[in-house]
Image (cartoon, rainbow, N blue to C red):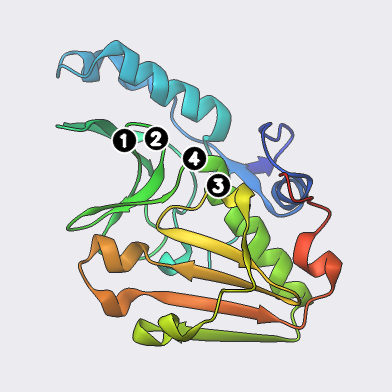
Amino acid sequence: MSTRRVDRIPDGLTRRARAFVGTHGVRVAVRPVEDHRQWWLERDVPAAVIDLMAAFQARWGGLLLPPAPQYDGGPRHLDPDSPEQDPAGWWFEAGAQRTAVPYAFLVGPSGEFGIQGYEWAPLHATVEGWVESLALAHHASLGAKQITRLVGDDVDGIDLSRYEPVREVRGLADTWWRGPDSLVSVYSGEATAMASPRGRAALVYSGLDDWGLRGGVDDDA
């Protein structure tokens, strides 16, 4: 697999996420969407959907980032494939699994990034939100004095009353919360996609200073 540095970082990311992608990301060679266009058209995939996949590939295609702390690391790298339709609209694969997990990583009809198991679980409202969550997990892990993992019903014991949502991750099933000296990530995607409440998980990054809490990102990011 040939790789190269990320010389073009997608816009729309915070400074923290841009630094993360530029420092830790690489691009791997991928086959252009256009090579499959005629094959998909012959199978009644609308041209507009193929255009969306081509746009996704131009922006994200081949981007390989460090593994996520959940979902066994997330996609191996980002690359669109396998468009499918259901009553809600058209979907396509966001990238092949990094490990053997029982669900696929998809981009939904409204651009959501999520997983499809028994059910559809949109994790973030945009692909940018997924990348922001990876960047924040990396950033928090560097500054935290302690990282605590909770699973299942224990997640309900986290008191978030003094926390505010971290907006830049555009959280849906998965959310991030910022408190006085800690960050909390809550992962509910597997619980939804696999109909398993015990699949919920949370990570508490405690003992953070202001830089650790925000990494140069202001409240309006």
Q: Which residue is mark 4?
A: 126
Q: Which residue type carries mark 1?
A: Phe
176 up-or-down from 143: above or below: above
Q: Mark 3 or mark 2, which has the lower sequence index?
A: 2
Q: Mark 1 or mark 3, which has the lower sequence index?
A: 1
Q: Which residue type carries mark 4?
A: Thr
Label 1 element class = strand
Residues at badges 3 and 2 in contact (C-beta under 8 Å)? no
Q: Which residue is painted at 76% across and 73% down in the image?
A: 142
The residues bearing labels 2 and 4 have C-alpha atoms spaced at a distance of 15 Å
66 up-or-down from 156: above or below: above
Q: Which residue is mark 2?
A: 80
Q: Which mark is residue 92?
A: 1
**Residue 7: x %, y % from top left:** 74, 34
Q: Nearer the viewer, residue 176 or 126?
A: 176
Residues at badges 1 and 2 in contact (C-beta under 8 Å)? yes
**Residue 17: x %, y % from top left:** 70, 49
Q: Which mark is residue 3?
A: none
In the picture, measured across the screen, residue 125 lies left or right of residue 22, that is left
The residues bearing labels 1 and 2 have C-alpha atoms spaced at a distance of 6 Å
155 up-or-down from 172: above or below: below
Q: Which residue is mark 3?
A: 129
Q: Nearer the viewer, mark 1 or mark 3?
A: 3
In the picture, measured across the screen, residue 194 lies left or right of residue 175, that is left
